[in-house]
Image: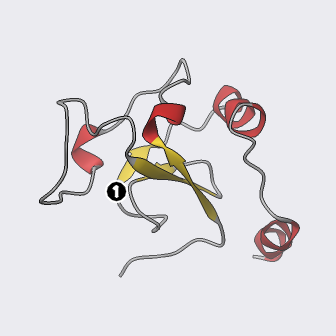
């Protein structure tokens, strides 16, 4: 069964591809009839989801369609500084109590 995290935020795939260490799992992209894949996963306007654990998925579920999961200090810094990704206080407190 699919699992939803406490928080995720949608971004265009092109924003993620700005990270110098970006390597996407092209097989993890959801298959749709109207997909406009260009041979390297999906087009730059494709929306992906940055999860609370800094993993990137092609959908809202934290454990499905994982496109990127190489979570490093550099990746976290990129997400926070370049993408302005920040967990809301409520999500932070729920995570701490888990």
Residue furthest to the left in view is 33
Instruction: Identify the residue position indicated by label 1 in the image.
Output: 65
The quarter holding residue 31 reads bottom left
Q: Where residue 98 sits: x, y (%)?
A: 75, 76
Is 75 placed left or right of 12 in the picture?
Answer: right
Q: Secondary structure at mark 1?
A: loop
Residue displayed at 31% across by 38% down = 25
Q: Nearer the viewer, residue 88 or 92?
A: 88
In this rendering, is residue 10 above or below 88?
A: above
Q: Where residue 97 sits: x, y (%)?
A: 82, 76
Residue displayed at 68% across by 26% down = 74
In this rendering, is residue 22 above or below 97?
A: above
Q: Where residue 76 sits: x, y (%)?
A: 70, 37
Is 49 placed left or right of 88 in the picture?
Answer: left
Is 93 placed left or right of 50 in the picture?
Answer: right
Q: Where residue 60 sits: x, y (%)?
A: 47, 67
């Amino acid at each position: 069964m699919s699992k939803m995290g406490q928080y995720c935020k949608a971004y265009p795939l092109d924003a993620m591809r700005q990270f110098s260490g970006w390597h996407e799992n092209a097989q993890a992209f959801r298959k749709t009839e109207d997909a406009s894949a260009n041979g390297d996963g999906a087009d730059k306007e494709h929306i992906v989801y940055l999860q609370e654990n800094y993993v990137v998925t092609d959908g809202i579920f934290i454990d499905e369609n994982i496109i990127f999961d190489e979570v490093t200090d550099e990746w976290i810094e990129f997400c926070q500084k370049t993408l302005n990704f920040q967990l809301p206080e409520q999500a932070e407190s729920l995570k701490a109590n888990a």
